[in-house]
């Protein structure tokens, strides 16, 4: 997969050189390119913004500069992703769908955002365009949201995560449940013991206990997910035993 990120703060994306995503890039699993939007400006001051039509506070990012940048970067196959607080909320389902794409281009806005005609233009020219929010809170720009989405998508690419099994039982995985609590050595820490079933070696009971804890956590912390629960995806064996 190729991922392009266009931003006025390229250094913000340095975190993508680290850890799993960094290793995926070195292994050639992820071709990530970060671009400075100002490289497409034509004036001496490398201006990317202007005052908003209709008045109001702040500045808006210019469509002409974004248009020349995205015409260069999108190529024939790019799927444009625009982080925005006014977008559809990004979920694991979005991550799974984006992970099937060949080429993603993230347009990181700043100021009051990017001129609305930019997303409209590429949608009208038949491109896939996703305006996505990473949650109901306001950031200062699209870079942090892009870091979140690139990590969530990148880790789903084949070969990136060592043990693909670990992708199955995560929170928001196939069954739509939150993850069960996890424990490791020592068996007693600060007078806190481990749930006995986890020491039993009885795999079916352990699986059932984990499923029960995941359901309990989901019902308690995210009752909204219970309504959307895909019962068919739950391992019927666990629930039956
Ligand atoms: N979920 C979320 C996205 C954003 C966001 C995204 C882009 C820009 C550009 C200027 N401010 C921005 C904020 N805030 N919160």
Image (cartoon, grey):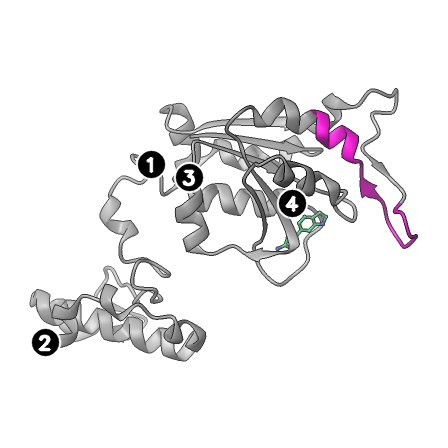
Q: Earlier in the sequence, mark 1 or mark 3?
A: 3
Is 112 situated left or right of 96 in this image?
Answer: right
- Crowd tier of the residue under label 3, counting other residues whose Cα lies within 10 Å: few below 14, some 14–19, many 20 or above: many
Is 59 situated left or right of 77 in this image?
Answer: right
Q: Residue at x 67, y 42 (%)?
A: 119
Is the distance from the Cβ of mark 4 to the nearest ligand 1 atom less than 8 Å? yes
| Alpha-carbon span between mark 3 and mark 4 | 18 Å
Residue under label 4: 142
Region of the chain picked out in magenta, as a range: 52-68
In the structure shown, which secondary structural element does the residue marked by tag 2 occupy? loop
Q: Earlier in the sequence, mark 1 or mark 4?
A: 4
In the structure shown, which secondary structural element does the residue marked by tag 4 occupy? loop
Q: Are marks 1 and 3 in contact (CB under 8 Å)?
A: yes
Q: Earlier in the sequence, mark 2 or mark 4?
A: 4
- Residue sitting at the far right: 55
* Residue 75 appears in the figure: yes
């Amino acid at each position: 997969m190729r991922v392009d990120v266009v931003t006025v703060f390229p250094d913000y994306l340095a975190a993508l050189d680290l850890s799993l995503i960094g290793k995926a890039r070195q292994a050639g699993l992820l071709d990530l390119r970060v671009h400075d939007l100002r490289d497409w400006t034509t004036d001496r001051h490398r201006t990317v913004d202007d005052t908003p039509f209709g008045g109001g506070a702040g500045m808006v990012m210019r469509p002409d500069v974004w248009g020349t940048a995205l015409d260069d970067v999108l190529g024939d196959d790019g799927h444009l992703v625009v982080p925005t607080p006014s977008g559809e909320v990004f979920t694991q389902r979005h991550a799974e769908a984006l992970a099937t794409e060949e080429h993603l281009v993230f347009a990181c806005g700043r100021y009051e955002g990017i001129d609305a005609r930019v997303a409209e233009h590429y949608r009208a020219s038949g491109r896939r365009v996703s305006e996505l929010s990473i949650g109901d809170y306001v950031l200062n720009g699209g870079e942090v949201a892009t870091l979140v989405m690139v990590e969530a998508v990148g880790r789903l690419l084949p070969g990136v995560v060592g043990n693909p099994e670990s992708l199955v039982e995560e929170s928001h995985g196939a069954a739509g449940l939150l993850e069960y609590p996890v424990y490791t050595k020592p068996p007693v820490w600060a007078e806190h013991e481990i749930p006995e079933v986890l020491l039993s070696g009885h795999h079916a009971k352990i699986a059932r206990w984990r499923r029960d804890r995941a359901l309990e956590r989901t019902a308690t912390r995210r009752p909204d997910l219970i309504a959307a629960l895909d019962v068919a995806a739950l391992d019927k064996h666990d629930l039956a035993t």
